[in-house]
Image (tube, rainbow, N blue to C red):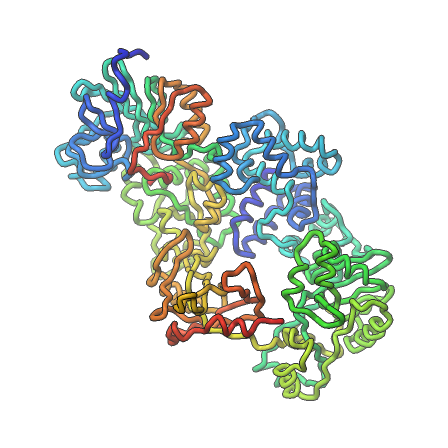
């Protein structure tokens, strides 16, 4: 990479109270308050908010935003940009590259006067049957998330986690297994992984995720037979031996009482630490995350070897320390407004 | 190792006893010998290693990664074994993943210096769950909420035999218990229980139902004695082997060398372990100082001397008395104890009575002295043989009425398993005047049973409707002089406690009644509890 010495990366992107701002292009990336022009990396609500004038994102992300906020989520208009295409905003070239986080998730690549910055948004490196896989893009500055930026977070292979769930269903045929999973992305990935593992029975889903399930199916993700997790005429026993997918908050809710002696499962990267599982009363933790774990974060930085690393939400200090040990210049951006929890 | 690791992982987060049994039985059913036997030994506390001290583990991990990154990781996770298990840099293919039996057998055979290299090699080869299991095994104490009795119950379920049969052979068998599993799977005869010093499964009593039982029972058929408030033990001295067991067959000999030394006889006694000073019995709190210790020092033994108050005689010399009626065993016991030269073993005296009314009067007003620390009375049929388990009819316990106190609900915590969507664990408090003279609630205990499912729903609704603050799974509930939910709490005893802010700790507290009607300001004062303090 080479760009004129008079140009500094912060001339192209700099943190502002509203989010990461691009002065020469006059747009924000994932702004946390309404702005005139926004580039959105993915549909989770802490990154994709309603009320911007113009929104540029992948067609899938735009569809997710419309589903969640209504068709009028952008005041002036939407600007779909497919993976691999590019557009010039003022003097700045913007393109979107798969980030592997959820359906439609993208890294925003911005180029200006020979300088390239990649804003990864949230990402993961491993295969996910519900979205396009992360593509590494050479750059001068790589802006990385750090949700799981501590060496304790090493997510195991997701097939093993799904196998543990199925084994438990087999061991406790009289109980219902309720899997807490975020409604956008995690839920569909868990369902899809269950299908890949050969579970072809009906999966029951909480009402809060039905619309997003349909949206995923419309984008070609086959989720198999799904039914709403409602009990007709009070037959609790109907759910014995079944798998129910619900938002994590529903586990502790009165909602879960309708099921027979439920096994509370939670699909999240945080489940790697037992105290976290215990704290939430989770009986079967499933370590399945849509964020890069420590190895994926550090492997990505080692692979890209960017001139500089900017670290956003999460555990910035440990990743900064790793960069220091590796001799990669790094700094924490300390952007506010993004959830440090897994997903949304 | 992988199957064992997954078992521990599941057990550590499973609250329900039945679910734990299912998990253990499932593991024992599919895991081959000798791995399952060593796993059973680990669960029952029959394995111990001194090869891996925490300091060594920490040094080993810091040689592999940046100390600052490790410090942050440890800070976040909070548990050394778990942190090391998570951060240890994997070296896939470096070594073959060891089986549990390889680990156990190799550690038994090597020196401490060699053991460290072995452990590091295993940590390289295992995944995070496997490393966690290995480190738990090394550093002692699995702490996954499984008692040795529960593990034995899982074996009993596996073989479809009564747990007493497992307990009886337990001390004659050794890890990895190949003979036990062969018997449980019907491939061979039951292992012989005839090892000197073995445990004999204990006979337990039913709680008496006052409304039904007295009307149909004849007082002349029953003997009565105090139910002393210590822990039930079996003391065996047989062909040179001396052992002290809990009623579930756990060997606690090492914790009570003073008692062991007093077992200068040939036989097996059933009795109550108590702290005794010059023949006078001290409170359960005194005994608690001696329990759950791996080792004991002379100072503690001198301050809290332990002894046995004998209830029954199971073995007299070489003669097994268990098939004799209680009346005959009692005569043999009296003669047996009178021959002993120690003051650490005495006789639980019989309490003669004519009618049930007379016995009720004794229970309500025990004579001063020792019986004040009895939990109640035991009734034993004179003709009862010593039968393991809890048979219905021959023995009854008739506990003293519990202490009662009115306390106010302060915090509620979500339960587990079937109750995980309910706030079912309650911390309650009583009033105390602070320095400014203001009445404030101070927590005095925690209870999670004593109410019906219907009442649980009502309390849960009360908690949700009156939450002031949340801390993870705990909610703090509105409780002040004007408003609050009063529980009538029943408990068995009260001790001074330096660990509780209130200075008192309850034994066996439970919700006796929910006093929806009672204004919170009329709940009890801490001073009421202080007057109930024992000794």
Give me the residue at 23% from left, 17% from top.
A112
Position of residue A30 relative to residue A7, above or below, is: below
Position of residue B90 relative to residue A302, above or below, is: below
Give me the residue at 58% from left, 36% from top.
B131
Decide if residue B513 is on the left or right side of residue B382: left
In this view, which residue lies farthest toward the front?
Answer: B436
Residue A308 versus residue B177: which sits nearer the camera?
A308
Residue B14 versus residue B62: which sits nearer the camera?
B62
The picture places residue A38, in percent across and down from the top left corner, at 20, 30
Decide if residue B515 is on the left or right side of residue A18: right
The picture places residue A138, in percent across and down from the top left corner, at 34, 17
Q: Quadrant of the N terminus of chain A?
A: top left
Task: Report the number of numbered marks.
Answer: 0
The picture places residue B44, in percent across and down from the top left corner, at 67, 51
Position of residue A320 relative to residue B376, above or below, is: above
Answer whether residue B166 is visible to the viewer in this image: no
Residue A135 sits in quarter: top left
Residue B45 versus residue A219: which sits nearer the camera?
B45
The picture places residue B166, in percent across and down from the top left corner, at 71, 56
Answer whether residue B439 is visible to the viewer in this image: yes
């Amino acid at each position: 990479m080479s760009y004129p010495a008079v140009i500094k990366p912060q001339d192209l992107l700099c943190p502002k109270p509203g989010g990461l701002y691009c002065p020469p292009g006059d747009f924000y990336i994932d702004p946390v308050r309404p702005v005139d022009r926004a580039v959105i990396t993915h549909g989770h609500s802490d990154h994709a908010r309603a009320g911007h004038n113009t929104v540029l994102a992948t067609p899938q992300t735009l569809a997710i935003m419309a589903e969640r906020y209504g068709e009028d989520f952008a005041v002036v208009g939407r600007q779909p940009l497919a993976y691999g295409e590019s557009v010039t905003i003022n003097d700045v070239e913007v393109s979107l590259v798969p980030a592997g986080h959820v359906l439609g998730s993208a890294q925003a690549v911005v180029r200006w006067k020979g300088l390239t910055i990649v804003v990864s948004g949230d990402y993961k490196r491993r295969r996910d049957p519900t979205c396009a896989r992360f593509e590494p893009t050479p750059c001068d500055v790589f802006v990385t998330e750090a949700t799981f930026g501590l060496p304790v977070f090493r997510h195991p292979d997701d097939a093993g986690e799904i196998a543990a769930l199925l084994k438990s269903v087999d061991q406790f045929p009289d109980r219902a297994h309720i899997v807490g999973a975020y409604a956008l992305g995690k839920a569909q990935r868990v369902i899809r992984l269950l299908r890949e593992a050969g579970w072809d029975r009906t999966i029951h889903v909480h009402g809060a995720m039905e619309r997003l399930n349909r949206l995923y199916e419309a984008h070609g993700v086959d989720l198999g037979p799904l039914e709403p997790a409602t009990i007709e005429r009070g037959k609790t026993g109907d759910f014995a031996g079944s798998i129910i997918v619900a938002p994590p908050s529903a586990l502790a809710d009165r909602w879960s009482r309708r099921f027979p002696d439920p096994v509370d499962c939670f699909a999240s990267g945080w489940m790697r630490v037992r105290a976290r599982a215990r704290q939430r009363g989770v009986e079967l933790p499933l370590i399945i995350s849509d964020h890069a774990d420590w190895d994926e974060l550090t492997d990505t930085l080692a692979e890209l070897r960017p001139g500089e690393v900017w670290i956003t939400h999460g555990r910035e200090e440990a990743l900064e320390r790793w960069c220091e040990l590796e001799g990669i210049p790094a700094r924490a951006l300390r952007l506010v407004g993004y959830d440090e929890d897994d997903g949304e | 190792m992988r199957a064992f690791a997954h078992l521990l992982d599941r057990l550590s987060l499973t609250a329900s006893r039945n679910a734990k049994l299912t998990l253990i039985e499932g593991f024992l059913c599919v895991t081959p010998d000798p791995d399952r036997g060593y796993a059973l030994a680990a669960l029952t506390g029959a394995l111990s290693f001194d090869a891996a001290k925490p300091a060594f583990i920490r040094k080993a991990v810091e040689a592999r990664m940046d100390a600052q990154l490790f410090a942050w990781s440890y800070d976040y996770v909070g548990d050394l074994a778990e942190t090391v298990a998570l951060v240890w840099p994997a070296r896939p293919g470096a070594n073959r993943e060891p089986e549990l039996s390889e680990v156990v057998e190799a550690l038994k055979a090597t020196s401490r210096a060699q053991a460290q290299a072995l452990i590091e090699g295993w940590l390289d080869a295992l995944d995070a769950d496997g490393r966690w299991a290995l480190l738990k095994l090394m550093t002692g104490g699995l702490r996954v909420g499984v008692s040795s009795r529960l593990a034995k119950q899982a074996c009993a379920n596996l073989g479809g035999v009564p747990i007493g049969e497992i307990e009886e052979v337990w001390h004659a068998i050794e890890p990895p218990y190949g003979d036990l599993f062969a018997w449980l799977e019907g491939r061979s005869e039951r292992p012989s229980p005839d090892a000197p010093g073995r445990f004999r499964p204990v006979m337990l009593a039913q709680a008496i139902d006052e409304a039904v039982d007295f009307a149909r029972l004849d007082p002349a058929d029953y003997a009565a004695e105090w139910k002393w408030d210590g822990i039930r033990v079996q003391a065996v001295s047989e062909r040179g082997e001396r052992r002290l067991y809990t009623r579930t067959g756990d060997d606690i000999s090492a914790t009570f060398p003073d008692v062991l030394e007093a077992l200068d006889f040939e036989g097996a006694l059933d009795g109550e372990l108590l702290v005794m000073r010059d023949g006078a019995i001290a409170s359960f709190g005194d005994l608690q100082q001696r329990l759950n210790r791996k080792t004991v020092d002379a100072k503690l033994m001198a301050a809290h001397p332990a002894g046995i108050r004998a209830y029954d005689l199971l073995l007299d010399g070489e003669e097994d008395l268990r098939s004799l009626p209680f009346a005959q065993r009692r005569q043999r016991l009296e003669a047996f104890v009178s021959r002993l030269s120690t003051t650490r073993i005495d006789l639980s005296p019989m309490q003669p009575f004519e009618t049930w009314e007379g016995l009720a009067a004794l229970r309500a007003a025990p004579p001063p002295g020792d019986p004040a620390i009895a939990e109640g009375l035991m009734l034993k049929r004179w003709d009862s043989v010593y039968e393991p388990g809890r048979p219905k009819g021959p023995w009854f316990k008739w506990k003293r009425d519990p202490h009662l106190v009115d306390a106010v609900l302060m915090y509620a915590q979500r339960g587990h398993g079937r109750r995980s969507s309910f706030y079912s664990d309650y911390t309650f408090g009583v009033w105390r005047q602070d320095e400014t003279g203001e009445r404030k609630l101070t927590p005095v205990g925690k209870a999670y049973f004593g109410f019906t499912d219907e009442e649980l729903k009502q309390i849960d609704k009360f908690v949700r409707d009156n939450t002031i603050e949340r801390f993870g799974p705990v909610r703090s509930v509105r409780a002040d002089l004007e408003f609050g939910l009063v529980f009538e709490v029943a408990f068995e005893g009260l001790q001074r406690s330096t660990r509780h802010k209130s200075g008192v700790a309850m034994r066996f507290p439970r919700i006796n009644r929910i006093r929806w009607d009672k204004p919170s300001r009329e709940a009890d004062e801490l001073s009421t509890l202080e007057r109930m303090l024992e000794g």
